[in-house]
Amino acid sequence: MRTQSSAIAPIGVAVSGRPGNSIGTLQAALGVAAFSLTFPATAWGLEGFGPWSLVAVRSVLAALIAGGCLLALRVPLPARRHWTGLAVVVAGVVFGFPLLTTLALQTSTTAHAAVVVGLLPLTTALFSALRVGTRPSRTFWTAALAGAAAVVAFTVQQSGGALTTADLYLFGALLICAAGYTEGGRLARVMPGWQVVGWALVLCLPLSVPAAVLALSYEPVQLTWHSVTGLLWVAAGSQFLGLVVWYRGMAAIGIPKASQLQLAQPLLTLVWSVLLLGEHLTVAAPLTAAAVLVCIAVTQRARG
């Protein structure tokens, strides 16, 4: 089969034929909006599925969607030199982060779990600096640290300041997802973002299909409106469509700046948690939201 081949352009530099900064920012923001529903949808899914079943089945369903698109459009296989990067995306985004956060959400509230998302932009920027050599400005880092601190303080306060055994899962998910985001953003410079996601999901099928069969045979399943809706969203919305626009956004505006848009994700997740799960927020929510939005504005204007 034919393979794709292209030179890698520097991350964060506009490339001819790619969306401009405004479109890239919009795409990254849409990805954040899709991801903000992941934790509430996972909580719904856990009402009818076990954690291993939910993760494996969502991966299979997302791979079927992605594989159908790749097949229908006759997309050639990616170049062999990109397979290692795709494997990192699989480990970090397709399998690792969903599994670890799903295990954490068995005993953690969505508010407490959102601390992972609050730290993810900073961790992704650090991985980006190590992996692709980006060097954001001091203003960028100051705003990023301030935004991350605000989000962490808010989410910890919402959970009563208590640390749970789920924290190990959450911090593991934080590190592995940042690696997957960074590698996926790099690959999205040389192939369309949806193809990065699509091939990563398809490559995971030899693992996800047996895992789904095995998990479903051991974990009881109760099909309810909540559990089915939650499963479908994390499969189609979070696992495929959200990652498509997210990677396209990162490719257009750069990994560090795109990652800072994710500072708003925990607050969006808390809003959905109130509306969908009946959780209660304190008056600190709007104050934190304002602080985070200021930090996002600063990071988007700061130059590397």
Image (cartoon, helix red, strand yellow):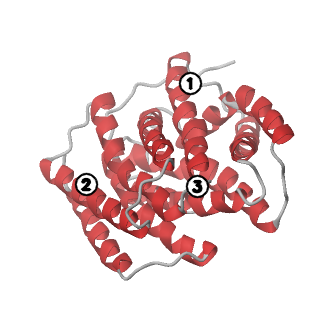
Residue at the image position 68 percent from the left and 58 percent from the top: 233
Residue 248 in the image: state x and y as whole percent: 48, 47
Q: Quadrant of residue 289?
A: bottom left
| Callout 3 amino acid | Thr
Disc assigned to residue 107:
3
Residue, x 60% and y 21% (percent of image)? 3
Q: Amino acid at mark 1?
A: Gln
Q: Position of residue 209 (x, y in %)?
A: 78, 33
Question: Mark 1 = which residue?
Answer: 4
Q: Taking 116 as reference, is 229 above or below it?
A: below
Q: Kindly check if marks 2 and 3 are in contact, taking CB atoms under 8 A apart as contact.
A: no
Question: Which quadrant of the rendered structure holds the N terminus?
Answer: top right
Q: Nearer the viewer, mark 2 or mark 3?
A: 3
- Circle 2 sits in a helix, a strand or a loop, which is it? helix
Q: What is the spatial separation of the Cα atoms under label 2 and label 1, in whole angstroms?
A: 35 Å
- In the image, 62 versus 191, the foreground residue is 62
Q: Residue furthest left?
A: 138
Q: Locate residue 73, reporting x and y percent.
A: 71, 39
* 40, above or below 287, in the image: above
